[in-house]
Image (cartoon, helix red, strand yellow):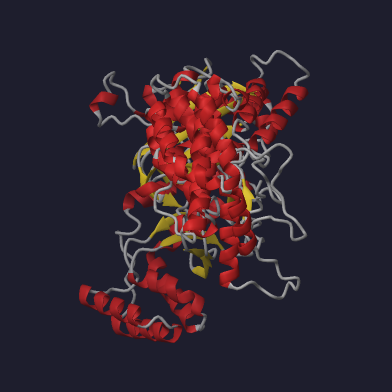
């Protein structure tokens, strides 16, 4: 990680982003509830407070790796001397009745039955821990002259002074809190009396300007610990050649910084353990194996603090799914010139289908690429067109970190690019995400809408493919299985257009077709049957959202492979796959109309187009021959124009003029049959034309993945509407079905 952080640090420094240097020994407290112990000048306990949450930078502590923490430390046992039987009896009573009154009574009984609190002895803190606190006190004594930072050495001095009676005094202070009657203290008092509990040592409230544990003390503490005068003996910094900066300077000595990274936890930015033979083959371990300037280590720690701060989520960092497993990876993005913008979200988070008000007929909402283009153009304009090479403020760094094991973090992807490359990539990506046919629409529930809203494929973020590709759809597309997906690094290379783009695109297209074809084909068939069937197939609408994302990704990959929709949708030999898919969709519509008339809407489980969809992807000529044979009785039915006109007149139901009235179930079914027959009969002439056109094409060669993808898109898009006809909603009683489609 050192090389990666070095590049980021240069970019932040070049753009003037402030970095508060943090000494490697300054760490964050673990998340959770903690007791703050305020000490008077004589070392006795002045007050005890509850801290609801100590993580996310709320409280700091000094620590040697995982040891010798202060002012944050932890007791080694409960304050009451409980044997095993007494402890088990208490836990049973504590869990049996969780009401505040019962729990207060149980704590009072426990205090009365257990005798005096555990006495202070040499076991806590351990002698080495006490010695380290005293050493820290000597290093930080110069802070006593600073009114804002003087509380830090004071709390250390007071703690060491009051040690002989610290634990009994703490127990007495907690007994008083229990007697005050505040139920909010019950859980933390119980935890402290019966087991180890984290503590934060501080000074009395009114004695100093700032608390010792205040995060604003970190800069002063780090500066004091980094002074040459504060380091002597084994801690003295040797002089040498820094491997990153090229300077001859004082070198870092001891542990490297260990920032607390989102999801990954405490992570050394560099570690080389001498106990692992393969890591110490040259006889060097720890800081001796990588000479680093002493002033760079705290700056790298500060870089991690700035980029992964809680309020920077979505801007410079976010969690992303790995290609396999449950623990997320950490994406860090640094574009210093626009540090306040949500660049990380734009790279990893898809646009939502409810980002656009109103209905859409396949039109995609605005996505993150618009933001990236705008940000990149601002950075380019700010540099006044200067040569982009060597300008750190224009550079963007993308870093993906992973917890390989509890003590090992790895940078699994690192890419440094610049604003111009980002602008170009965003433009290409916008064109690629628009490479989907018109007419692929599914009704999707949207917050604030009473009925589902038609939504077409929406823009996808480059890094979203990892989550999507991990889904294998089975059981006709109704169920997901979790499998290994595409690494985020490969997705980002596709976005930037680096390396073997065509090879990566073909591999990913093949993977999506194998894993998502069942979903896309099943949803398209369910949509053809009507809203009730679609809801039964996908009751939560999450499959529809996955399908819309998958369609966009298929369009992206076709675009990267040189297949824009203007080509594969055109009426040429090159577009035979798309037109064959439309033919299969139209055959389903015809089949449903036939069943609506002659079977009173009872449709068999398999529609004639959907039944040959898989065959069409492998042997299109065979599929066309099968379909041509099976269509004959349905086409004959559609030619009975007078009969169908009479039949539909019988089924038509006028909408109630009074909006407070509703149609009966029988009337609704009659309208559904009406529309199924109208649309089925209207599709027949276009099917005949499509069959004639496709019979002229050479469909004998073995289909490739592009053919299969275009076939699937054609099946999802369905037959095009006749010229001049559009989807719409009507305010009168014109013949518009519940899905907003008009029969031709």
Residue extending farthest left: 85
**Residue 449 position within the rendered picture, expressed as x and y whole percent measured from the top left:** 66, 60
Q: In percent of the image, x 50 and y 31: which residue is there?
A: 580
In this orientation, which residue lies closer to the viewer: 644 or 279? 644
Q: Which of the 4 quarters of the picture holds residue 299?
A: top right
Instruction: Say which residue appears at 60% left-offset and 24% top-offset.
Output: 571
Viewer-proximal residue among 224 and 453? 453
Q: Is residue 36 left or right of residue 13?
A: left
Rendered position, 390 above or below 329: above
Which residue sits at x=43%, y=43%? Answer: 608
Question: In terms of depth relative to the viewer, which is nearer, 327 or 428?
Answer: 428
Q: Judge from the rendering whether residue 445 lies leftward or rightward of residue 76; answer left or right.
A: right
Residue 382: x and y, percent? 77, 24
Check the picture and name the quadrant holding the N terminus.
Answer: top left
- Height in image: 484 above or below 448? above
Q: Is residue 594 visible?
A: yes
Regarding residue 295, the answer to whether it shows in the image is no
Q: Quadrant of residue 565?
A: top right
Residue at image position (48%, 51%) is 526
Quarter-of-image position of residue 731: bottom right
Please state the horizontal and vertical placement of residue 100, each as a whole percent of the image.
45, 83
In the rendered view, would you say 622 is above or below 470?
Answer: above
Residue 695 horizontal/vertical position (percent): 48, 25
Nearest the viewer among 210 and 532 is: 532
């Amino acid at each position: 990680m050192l090389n990666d952080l070095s590049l980021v640090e240069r970019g932040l420094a070049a753009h003037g982003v402030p970095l508060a240097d943090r000494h490697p020994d300054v760490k964050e407290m673990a998340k959770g509830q903690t007791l703050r112990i305020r000490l008077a000048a004589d070392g006795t306990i002045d007050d005890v407070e509850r801290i609801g949450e100590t993580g996310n930078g709320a409280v700091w502590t000094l620590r040697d790796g995982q040891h010798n923490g202060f002012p944050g430390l932890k007791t080694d046992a409960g304050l009451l001397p409980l044997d095993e039987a007494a402890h088990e009896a208490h836990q049973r009573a504590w869990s049996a009745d969780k009401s505040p009154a019962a729990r207060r009574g149980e704590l009072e009984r426990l205090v009365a039955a257990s005798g005096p609190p555990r006495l202070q002895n040499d076991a806590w803190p351990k002698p080495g821990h006490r010695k380290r606190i005293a050493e820290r006190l000597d290093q930080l004594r110069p802070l006593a002259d600073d009114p804002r930072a003087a509380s830090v050495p004071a709390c250390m001095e007071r703690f060491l002074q009051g040690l002989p009676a610290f634990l009994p005094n703490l127990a007495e202070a907690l007994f008083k809190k229990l007697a005050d009657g505040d139920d909010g203290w019950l859980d933390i008092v119980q935890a402290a009396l019966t087991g180890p509990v984290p503590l934060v040592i501080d000074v009395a409230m009114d004695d100093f300007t700032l608390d010792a544990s205040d995060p604003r003390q970190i800069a002063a503490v780090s500066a004091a610990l980094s002074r040459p005068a504060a380091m002597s003996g084994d801690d003295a910094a040797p002089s040498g050649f820094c491997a990153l900066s090229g300077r001859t300077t004082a070198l870092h000595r001891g542990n490297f910084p260990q920032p607390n990274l989102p999801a990954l936890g405490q992570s050394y930015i560099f570690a080389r353990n001498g106990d692992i033979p393969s890591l110490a083959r040259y006889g060097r371990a720890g800081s001796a194996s990588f000479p680093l300037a002493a002033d760079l280590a705290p700056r790298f720690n500060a870089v991690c603090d700035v980029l992964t701060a809680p309020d920077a989520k979505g801007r410079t960092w976010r969690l992303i799914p790995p290609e396999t497993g449950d623990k997320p990876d950490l994406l860090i993005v640094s574009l210093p010139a626009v540090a306040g913008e949500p660049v990380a979200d734009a790279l990893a988070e898809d646009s939502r289908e409810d980002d656009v008000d109103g209905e859409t007929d396949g039109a995609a909402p605005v996505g993150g690429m618009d933001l990236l283009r705008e940000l990149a153009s601002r950075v380019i304009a700010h540099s006044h067109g200067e040569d982009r090479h060597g300008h750190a403020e224009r550079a963007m760094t993308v870093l993906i970190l992973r917890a390989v094991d509890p003590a090992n973090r790895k940078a699994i992807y690192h890419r440094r690019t610049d604003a111009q490359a980002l602008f170009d990539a965003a433009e290409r990506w916008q064109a690629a995400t628009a490479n989907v046919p018109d007419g692929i629409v599914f009704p999707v529930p949207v917050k604030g809408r009473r009925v589902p809203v038609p939504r077409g494929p929406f823009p996808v973020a480059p890094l979203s493919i990892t989550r999507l590709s991990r889904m294998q759809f089975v059981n006709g597309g109704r169920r997901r299985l979790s499998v290994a997906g595409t690494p985020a690094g490969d997705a980002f290379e596709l976005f930037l257009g680096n390396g073997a783009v065509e090879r990566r695109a073909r591999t990913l297209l093949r993977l999506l077709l194998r894993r998502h074809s069942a979903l896309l084909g099943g949803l398209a068939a369910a949509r053809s049957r009507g809203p009730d069937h679609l809801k039964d197939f996908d009751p939560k609408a999450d499959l529809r959202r996955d399908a819309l994302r998958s369609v966009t990704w298929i369009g992206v990959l076709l675009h990267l492979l040189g297949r824009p929709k203007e080509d594969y949708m055109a009426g040429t030999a090159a577009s035979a796959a798309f037109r064959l898919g439309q033919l299969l969709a139209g055959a389903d519509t015809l089949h449903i109309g036939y069943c609506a008339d002659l079977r009173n809407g009872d449709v068999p489980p398999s529609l004639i187009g959907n039944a040959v969809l898989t065959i069409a992807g492998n042997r299109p000529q065979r599929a066309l021959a099968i379909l041509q044979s099976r269509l004959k009785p349905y086409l004959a039915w559609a030619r009975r124009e007078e009969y169908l006109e009479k039949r539909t007149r019988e089924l038509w139901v006028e909408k109630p003029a009074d909006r407070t009235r509703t149609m009966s179930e029988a009337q609704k079914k009659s309208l559904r049959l009406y529309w199924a027959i109208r649309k089925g009969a209207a599709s027949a002439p276009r099917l005949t034309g499509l069959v004639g056109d496709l019979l002229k094409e050479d469909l004998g060669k073995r289909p490739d993945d592009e053919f299969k993808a275009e076939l699937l898109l054609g099946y999802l898009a369905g037959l095009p509407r006749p010229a001049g006809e559009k989807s719409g909603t009507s305010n009168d009683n014109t013949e518009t079905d519940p899905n907003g489609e008009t029969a031709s």
